[in-house]
Image (cartoon, rainbow, N blue to C red):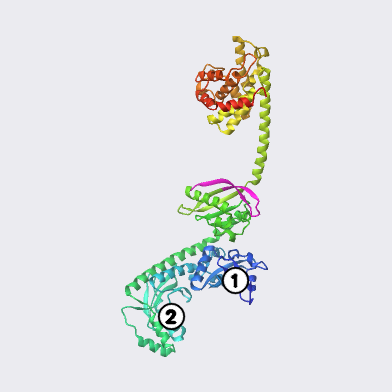
């Protein structure tokens, strides 16, 4: 809704800080042009307020129905515009009506409403600060509200120009009567002068004014300059009688409604002298605290200009980084993010700042994010994990979350900072590369299998021998504890175990009868020949094939060749291939022998357990006997 008259700068927001109404004058002030108000959140309007401060002010409006505060507006046309905002709460409609009044000078602004106020003031050491410029008045008002609720002790904090900064528990007899008539008001002001004249730091002074009520004051000094006072006023001591005749005469003299005036008198509190003394001691400490804090704030004001340049640089730097960056507090509530993060979410800061992932993401994603955040906070380290998310348009994105904790000055975890790396294009490229690699591996596998078959057929052995041995080796490798990648590599390399036979003369390789000693020595060289052929390759498959070619005839008891290795000195893959090769060789027909019956094969393998073969691997082989026979049957030479 648009609001008239247009001269009033009125803004209406709901409980979620969404703008639901605006006047034309306010729209012009905020430079909103014709932007629909449904797209506006109060936090997006460049007011100098944090989410925490805004919530405090709104809670104050809810409690007291109305509240005023100072802030500023960052305007493109006018620069920094200082504002006084008067707000009221309308509970029936659950809205806040804000009347926004620009001020002419920055001196009138409460600079400690937001630290950015100092960024604009420079380092003017001769600046005449007002007390309200140097303290967080809303916070102190809230503290004293609670104090009054507990103790019933009133308070007023007033600067030297008479501006009321904090007030609580002021009596009707003062606000509705004494300060409304010129002569009784003069009595009040005289009391203020009597109380504050010449009073020093950490002292307090009491005075019974001419209106016959007690007031007490203690000064607030900042850097040896008196800036204001804390007052405890409009009360009686409980050990003194009340002179009702005096107050009746006051009513008659100044035209007060006697009944209402005396009713107001009856509500004036009565305190013991001990309670007043203790309260003023407390207020004196509060004054010292305000003094110390305000002096610190002045020093901060004098140095924040340089800090602003650094922070501005960091903000600009964050926004120029194309990678999404976000940060949360330890309750997993978003505190902010860079422009890339806004674009990644498809949200403006007001849509996610002050909210959790559960508020802005689907349940399936929110659960994962929340669990990972809790794990990070518990383990107090760094966290990197890959996940697939969906954009607001529904498009899937592969990302890597890099998260760590940021800490406060005490070294305690203050929140989580995260970087989101979009690896969608990289994952697509990886999939394409894996497909190419798979094709290359399959090509290598086919070449190796074909070469192994050629070598075996040269020795007049069945071509499927190398395929069966490879399958046996793969099964045994997995059962032995090799990973799937290692077992697959073993399967591909195994067909090359007899590649060295390419260097053995045909008349020896295919001799149908028994070999002579010299011929057997020549046969044995196929292990070293194979190794020499393959050893210089840089590829894992051929490196492993070289190892198998060299040592697949070594024996567990050390009587094998070519090196006479024994036991675990023999590479495990070679011990696996040895069993697979011998089993297939003796259970199938060769040019120099017939196939052995399976019971005879099993008896031989059992006999050679601990002699020719690794006992553990033989046990694994027998434990998988049925599966071995299935492979043998599926890859039969007769198919």
Asked if residue 397 is among those painted magenta in the image, a careful observer would answer: yes
User: Is 349 positioned to the left or the right of 292 in the image?
Assistant: right
User: Is 483 positioned to the left or the right of 240 in the image?
Assistant: right
In the depicted structure, whether residue 439 falls above or below residue 263: above
Toward the viewer: 72 or 599?
599
Residue 237: % across, % down: 34, 78
Q: Quadrant location of the N terminus? A: bottom right
Residue 370: % across, % down: 53, 52
Residue 521: % across, % down: 60, 12
Magenta segment boundaries in residue numbering:
380-401
The residue carrying mark 1 is 11
Between the C-alphas of marks 1 and 2, the distance is 32 Å
Residue 271: % across, % down: 34, 75
Residue 484 visible somewhere in the drawing: yes
Asked if residue 562 is among those painted magenta in the image, a careful observer would answer: no
Dominant secondary structure of the residues highlighted in magenta in the image: strand
Toward the viewer: 142 or 503?
503
Q: Earlier in the sequence, mark 1 or mark 2?
A: 1
Q: Kindly state the secondary structure of the residue where label 1 is placed.
A: strand
Few, some or many C-alpha atoms within 10 Å of disc 1 (few <14, some 14-19, many ≥20)?
Answer: many
Q: Quadrant location of the C terminus? A: top right
Question: In the figure, residue 511 lies in which quadrant?
Answer: top right
Residue located at (42% from left, 83% from top): 187
Q: Kindly state the secondary structure of the residue where label 2 is placed.
A: helix
Toward the viewer: 293 or 452?
452
The residue carrying mark 2 is 172
Q: Which mark is residue 428?
A: none
Residue 310 visible somewhere in the drawing: no
């Amino acid at each position: 809704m648009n609001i008239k008259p247009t001269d009033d700068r009125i803004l209406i927001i709901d409980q979620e800080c969404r703008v639901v109404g605006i006047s034309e004058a306010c729209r012009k002030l905020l430079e909103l042009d014709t932007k629909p108000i449904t797209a506006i959140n109060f936090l997006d309007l460049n007011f100098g307020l944090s989410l925490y401060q805004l919530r405090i002010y709104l809670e104050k409006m809810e409690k007291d129905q109305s509240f005023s505060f100072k802030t500023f507006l960052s305007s493109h046309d006018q620069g920094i515009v200082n504002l006084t905002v008067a707000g009221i709460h309308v509970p029936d409609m659950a809205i806040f009506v804000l009347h926004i009044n620009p001020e002419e000078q920055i001196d009138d602004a409460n600079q400690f409403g937001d630290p950015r106020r100092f960024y604009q003031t420079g380092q003017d050491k001769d600046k005449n600060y007002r007390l309200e410029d140097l303290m967080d008045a809303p916070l102190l008002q809230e503290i004293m509200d609670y104090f009054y609720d507990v103790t019933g002790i009133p308070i007023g904090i007033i600067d030297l120009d008479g501006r009321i900064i904090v007030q609580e528990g002021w009596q009707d007899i003062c606000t509705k009567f004494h300060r409304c008539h010129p002569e009784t008001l003069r009595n009040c002001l005289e009391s203020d002068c009597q109380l504050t004249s010449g009073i020093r730091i950490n002292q307090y002074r009491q005075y019974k004014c001419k209106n016959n009520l007690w007031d007490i004051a203690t000064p607030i000094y900042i850097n040896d300059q008196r800036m204001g006072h804390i007052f405890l006023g409009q009360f009686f001591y409980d050990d003194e009688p009340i002179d009702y005749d005096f107050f009746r005469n006051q009513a008659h003299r100044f035209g007060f409604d006697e009944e209402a005036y005396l009713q107001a008198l009856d509500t004036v509190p009565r305190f013991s002298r001990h309670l007043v003394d203790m309260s003023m001691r407390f207020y004196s400490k509060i004054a010292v605290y305000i003094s110390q804090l305000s002096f610190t704030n002045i020093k901060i004001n004098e140095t924040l200009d340089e800090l602003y340049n650094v922070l501005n640089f960091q903000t600009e730097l964050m926004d120029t980084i194309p990678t999404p960056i976000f940060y949360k507090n330890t309750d997993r509530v978003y505190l902010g993010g860079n422009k890339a993060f806004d674009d990644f979410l498809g949200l403006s800061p007001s849509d996610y700042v002050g909210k959790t992932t559960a508020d802005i993401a689907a349940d399936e994603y929110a659960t994962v994010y929340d669990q990972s955040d809790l794990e990070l906070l518990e383990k107090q380290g760094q966290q990197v994990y890959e996940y697939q998310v969906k954009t607001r348009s529904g498009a899937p994105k592969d990302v890597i979350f890099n998260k760590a904790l940021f800490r406060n000055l005490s070294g305690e975890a203050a929140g989580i900072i995260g970087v989101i790396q979009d690896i969608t294009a990289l994952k697509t490229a990886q999939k394409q590369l894996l497909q190419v690699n798979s094709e290359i591996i399959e090509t290598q596998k086919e070449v190796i299998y074909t070469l192994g078959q050629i070598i075996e057929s040269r020795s007049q052995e069945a071509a499927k021998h190398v395929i069966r041995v490879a399958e046996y080796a793969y099964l045994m490798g997995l059962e032995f504890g090799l990973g799937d990648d290692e077992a697959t590599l073993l399967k591909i390399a195994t067909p090359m175990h007899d590649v060295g036979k390419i260097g053995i003369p045909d008349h020896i390789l295919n001799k149908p009868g028994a070999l002579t000693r010299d011929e057997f020595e020549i046969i044995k060289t196929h292990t070293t020949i194979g190794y020499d052929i393959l050893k210089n390759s840089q590829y894992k498959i051929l490196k492993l094939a070289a190892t198998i070619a060299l040592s697949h005839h070594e024996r567990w008891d050390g009587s094998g060749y070519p090196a006479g290795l024994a036991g675990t000195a023999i590479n495990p893959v070679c011990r696996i291939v040895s069993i697979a090769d011998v089993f297939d060789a003796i259970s199938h027909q060769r040019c120099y022998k017939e196939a052995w019956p399976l019971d005879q094969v099993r008896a031989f393998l059992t006999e050679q357990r601990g002699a020719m073969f690794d006992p553990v691997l033989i046990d694994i082989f027998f434990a998988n006997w049925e599966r071995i026979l299935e492979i043998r049957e599926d890859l039969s030479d007769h198919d």
